[in-house]
Structure formats: structure tokens, C-alpha cells
Image (cartoon, rainbow, N blue to C red):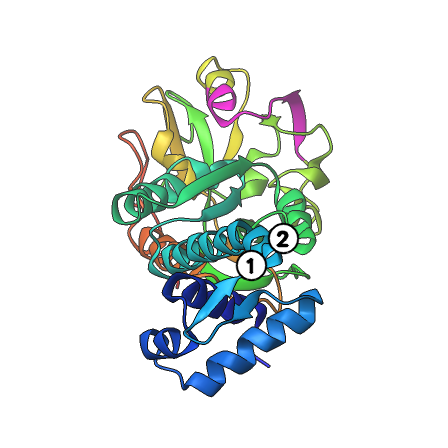
Amino acid sequence: MPEPHGLYEVFLRVARDGSFTAAARSLGYTQSAVSRQVQALEEEWGTALFDRLPRGVRLTEAGRVLLPHAEGVRERLRAARAELAALRSLGGGTLRIGAFAAANVSLVPRALAAFGERYPGVTVVHSEGPTAKHAALLAEGGLDLAVLSTPAGIALPGPELYHLLDEPMHVALPRGHRFAERAVLRLPELADEDWIEGDVRPEQTLLAPALAAGFLPRVAFRVNDWTAKQGFVAAGLGITVLPELAAGAVRPDIVLVPVDPADLPCRKVYAGTPRGLRHSPAVGAFLSLLRSAAAGRTEPAAGTASARPTTRQ
């Protein structure tokens, strides 16, 4: 039996043409096929929809009641077909993305700008937060894609992961610091420094991978915002770890010096999507643009002590 929406299309055509034969000619069906579909719809509703006349047909009272509803079904289906076509062509729909704070300095905005230029009909909903939050949202169906991070060697279970880059770590120092001209720093050299970090517990900071080797920083101030951390450093209140993705917004009155990867390995940065689900066209397009942005991300601002390490893709 044809799908219900097909039956309604036939019903509307017969009502318009006033004849099974004329409707069949318009639809490209046989007259008997049209008759069977009308009969199937009448059986579904339990009443005759047309009076069969010597020349053609005429709507019964039940048919006249059904007519505006059938027209409504047709219009809703036309709208649905248009929306689905827009999704396929990226002319409409919604893309829900999330990212951790440092990724929002340059990486995500560059991808978003390129996406908006190419696909202005797609509405983008963006959220910022830690990787754990966005991994959970991916699992719950609350996001379509998220930019996630994890220390080297630490698994990130749950999402389907697509590697974007390996992110080196830098130490942010005030200008005039005794190590400001160094090309690279070892963490043991910084054992006596005060640190500005997002948590007073070192295991909850970017310094966590160094704890296993015995490095224990002295956290003097807890500051979460990257810009605020730089302000504390510039004021001489301490030093902080600054990931490479945040280096594009470094203040001119501080200096970045790379940390030896032997002391603080690169952080893994991924695009994550819900595991086992088919990508929408919008997700596939945005993932491609994220990869392009990761391959050509912004160089550090003036004041960086040395060139940034080559990205390993």
C-alpha cells in the first residue's frame, strides 16, 4: 500500500480533476492504480470520500471535511522536503558546537568565520567549557561537535575523536624576568617561583603531567581567565603555564618561553563527535574547516622568546 502522504496527493488530485482518469493522466498512474489508492484511503477513514458518477466523481460530505486537512498534510510535507534539502545543501539547519577556553582564542573563531562565510544559512550555537562538560554533552546528544583536549598519554573515552594538533606548553613570564631571554625552560628551574593557576591543586592544572616526575609548583593565586592570568604575571605576582592555542592573545608586557616537552608534554587537541552516529553535512564541513584552522593557526604575538615548535599533525 502506498504511504499515507501518497494517498493524500492522489486524493487531492482526484478532487481537483473530478475524475480518476484525469487524475491518473496528471500523475502518470494508471486509472486502476488511482482507483485503488482512493479506495485504500476510504478504507482507512471508514467512509466514502467520492460519489462515483456516470461522468467522473464528486466529493462526498466526508471528502469535503477531509480536503483542507489533506491540503495541510501536503504543505507540511513540502516544508519538510525543503528543510531536508536545506540540511543536505547546508542552506539551513543548526550546528551545536562546544570548545574549551584556549581553543576559543583563535582556532574555533577562525573555523567559525570561514563556516559562516560559506554557509550563512546554518545557525551555529556555541558553548564554552571544560572538556569533561562537552564530552558529556556529546554523549547526551546535546552537541554535534566539540573541541576537546587531554594530556598526552591520557585516554578520552566516549566521543569519536579526530586529531587536530599537539599543543606545546609555554611559561608566561613578566618582562625583565631572569629567564625571559631563554629559548626553552626546564620545570625544575622554576621550582622556587610563585605560580598563577586555575586551581590551587596542581593536579587540576596544566602542570598535572609534571607531578609524576616530582615537580610540585607553589600555587600562589587561583585565576581561571587567560587574560586575567596574564595580568597577574605582568604585575610580577607569579608565572603561569600558557598553552599554545592561547598564545595568539598574549599581552605585550609578558614573555612566553617554551617548556621542554620532556617536562611538560604537548596536550592533545581533538574534534569530538557523538560515537557511532552519522555526521550531518554541517558537522563534516565544520570539521574540515577546523582541520584547516589547526594547520595554520596564528603565530604568537610580539614578545615571545622564540619561534613556536612545529605542529605535529
- Quarter of the image for residue 223 reads top right
Q: Is residue 313 left or right of residue 239?
A: left
Question: Which residue corresponds to the image point at 55% horizontal and 67% vertical from the top-left?
Answer: 50
Q: Which residue is denoted by mark 1 in the rendering?
A: 273
Question: Which residue corresponds to the image point at 51% horizontal and 45% vertical from the top-left?
Answer: 96
* Cβ atoms at labels 2 and 1 below 8 Å apart: yes
**Residue 237 shows in the view:** yes
Q: Position of residue 126 (x, y in %)?
A: 49, 38
- In the image, residue 232 sits, relative to residue 44, either above or below, namely above
What is the spatial separation of the Cα atoms under label 2 and label 1, in whole angstroms? 6 Å
Q: Amino acid at mark 2?
A: Leu
Q: Position of residue 313 (x, y in %)?
A: 39, 64
Q: Is residue 220 magenta?
A: yes
Q: Is residue 20 magenta?
A: no
Front position in the image: 305 or 11: 11
Question: Which residue corresponds to the image point at 58% horizontal and 41% vertical from the top-left?
Answer: 188
**Residue 262 shows in the view:** no
Q: Which region is colored magenta? A: 217-230
Q: Which residue is denoted by mark 2 in the rendering?
A: 138
Q: Amino acid at mark 1?
A: Thr
Front position in the image: 229 or 7: 7
- In the image, residue 249 sits, relative to residue 82, either above or below, namely above
* Label 1 crowd (10 A; few <14 / some 14-19 / many >=20): many
Question: Which residue corresponds to the image point at 38% horizontal and 60% vertical from the top-left?
Answer: 85
* Label 2 crowd (10 A; few <14 / some 14-19 / many >=20): many
Farthest residue, direction top: 235
